Amino acid sequence: MKPPKQMPAHSMREDRPKKRPANWYSDEDMDDGEEAIRMIRNMFGYNPKKYADVDVGDMEANFDDILKEERRSAKIAREEDEQEQCLIEEEERRIEDAEGGKEVQALANIDLENRIKEDCHYFLKLKTLLYLF
């Protein structure tokens, strides 16, 4: 008697259940996502065709560009610090007036302080605009 033949390995694999494909979601879900993207783009007025010409492969900054941006950021930071310092000084003056029992003096200085505050803000905004250009 002959021994029974072994079944080939590939035939045993065919009996196993197939794995689920990686993209097991339905196409209907994809349509909903595309619809949502379209609605968001319409809400914000975004047109992807407008940027089709832009070559994103050449979006690298050289050292000079980085230094220029760093200088610009430093100027803006200095201006913000100056503005904050103006506000701190104004608050300190207000506290000193209130602590000294000079309520009448403080009320008289409110108009002056408001004008100083407006001048300080105007000066810093003007300075910021000049640095940006």
Image (cartoon, grey):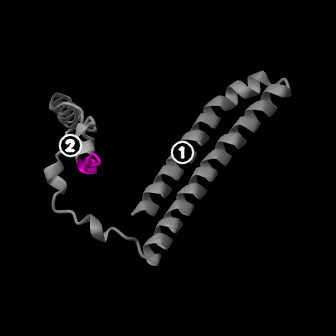
Residue pushed farthest left? 49
Front residue of 103 and 24: 24
Q: Secondary structure at mark 1?
A: helix
Q: In the rendered view, does 56 fall on the left or right side of 105?
A: left
Q: Nearer the viewer, mark 2 or mark 1?
A: 2
- Image disc number at residue 46: 2
Q: Is residue 105 on the magenta stretch? A: no
Q: Residue at x 49, y 64 (%)?
A: 72
Which image quadrant for residue 46? top left
| Up/down of 120 relative to 44, above or below | below
Q: Name which residue type carries label 2.
A: Tyr
Tell me the residue at 60%/58% (across/down): 78
Mark 2–mark 1 CB contact (< 8 Å): no
Q: Is residue 18 left or right of residue 31?
A: right
Earlier residue among tags 2 and 1: 2
- Mark 1: amino acid: His
Residue at position x 56%, y 62% in the image: 74
Please name whichever residue, 77 or 28, is drawn nearer the observer in this view of the structure: 28
Q: Position of residue 51 (x, y in %)?
A: 19, 56
Task: Tell me: 64 left or right of 8.
Answer: right
| Residue 40, quarter of picture | top left
> How far across and down, in percent of the image, does residue 100 sit?
86, 28
Give the overall secondary structure of the magenta segment. Answer: loop
> Looking at the rendering, in which quadrant would you find the C terminus?
bottom left
Q: Is residue 8 above or below residue 93?
A: below
Q: Check residue 121 in the rendering and tell me which mark sits there, or answer none.
A: 1
Tell which residue pokes out farthest to the front in this image.
Answer: 1
Where 69 falls versus 37 (above or below)?
A: below
The residue depicted at 68 percent of the width and 28 percent of the height is: 108
Q: Which residues are magenta?
A: 1-10
Camera-side residue: 37 or 42? 37
